[in-house]
Amino acid sequence: GQNIDQPTEMTATEGAIVQINCTYQTSGFNGLFWYQQHAGEAPTFLSYNVLDGLEEKGRFSSFLSRSKGYSYLLLKELQMKDSASYLCAVKDSNYQLIWGAGTKLIIKP
Amino acid sequence: GAVVSQHPSWVICKSGTSVKIECRSLDFQATTMFWYRQFPKQSLMLMATSNEGSKATYEQGVEKDKFLINHASLTLSTLTVTSAHPEDSSFYICSASSSAGSGANVLTFGAGSRLTVL
């Protein structure tokens, strides 16, 4: 079966750095997405990786290793507004999006 | 950027009634729209995929006669929850893609509709 694993919850301190990991086992691979979802709101797109390596976008970076079935989302200079759930999603060989359960990130002052 | 409008943002209805949720792509043509459901503290669950002008493809376990999807134009898809019951209470989110298949295509989500069935 297809599976995406990410931690259920993480806690970090304002101003610090946090890394949210995502491992996947899917039938084929056509890209990995990270979305941010604040409570009661719809997800918003953060990043897309299809080749191995690091994609940097401001305070957020996303890394992919296809051989390991692994990605991480790195958030720097954490702000209180970064408190949200972070969803990892992979497009399989049929271009279907497989979603992880999300990681709830709690930022403390 | 691409914008998807979803309406209503929240709705309360009595058990047995039907509720229609609209999803519109405002500045692009959405050949494919997706309907998701999300229960508290859980991830997105894909309910169905709709392509303009054709019947929706429902995920396993989703009753197509209960959740009616119509994608009549390239900018509008509707989800009708028929004969709603309290267990249908959930957060329903639509998303749209400007083209099917392409790996890099980013889904744009509507703001979601919170349905409460009394």
Image (tube, coloured by chain):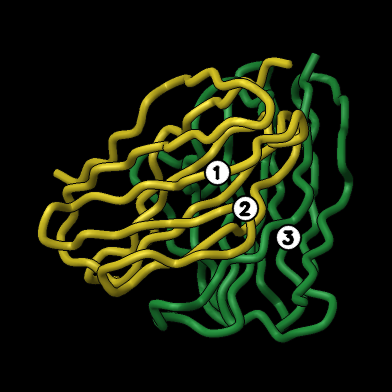
Residue at 75 percent across and 29 percent down: it is A80
Per the image, the residue denoted by label 3 is: B78
Between circles 1 and 3, the one closer to the viewer is: 1
Q: Residue at x 73, y 16 (%)?
A: A109
Residue at 84% in and 76% down: B26
Q: CA distance from mark 1 to mark 3?
A: 36 Å
Q: Amino acid at mark 2?
A: Arg
The front one of B14 and A14 is A14
Please name the amino acid that badge 3 sits on.
Thr
Chain of the residue on which disc 3 is drawn:
B
Dot 2 alpha-carbon crowd within 10 angstroms: few under 14, some 14 to 19, many 20 or more:
few
Q: What mark, if any, has residue A75 been given in the picture?
A: 1
The numbered mark at residue A59 is 2
- Disc 1 marks a residue whose amino acid type is Leu
- Quarter holding residue A7: top left
Rendered shade, chain B = green
Quadrant of image for the C terminus of chain B: top right
Q: CA distance from mark 2 to mark 1?
A: 6 Å
Above or below, B49 against A4 in this view is below
Choose the circle earlier in sequence order: 2 or 1: 2
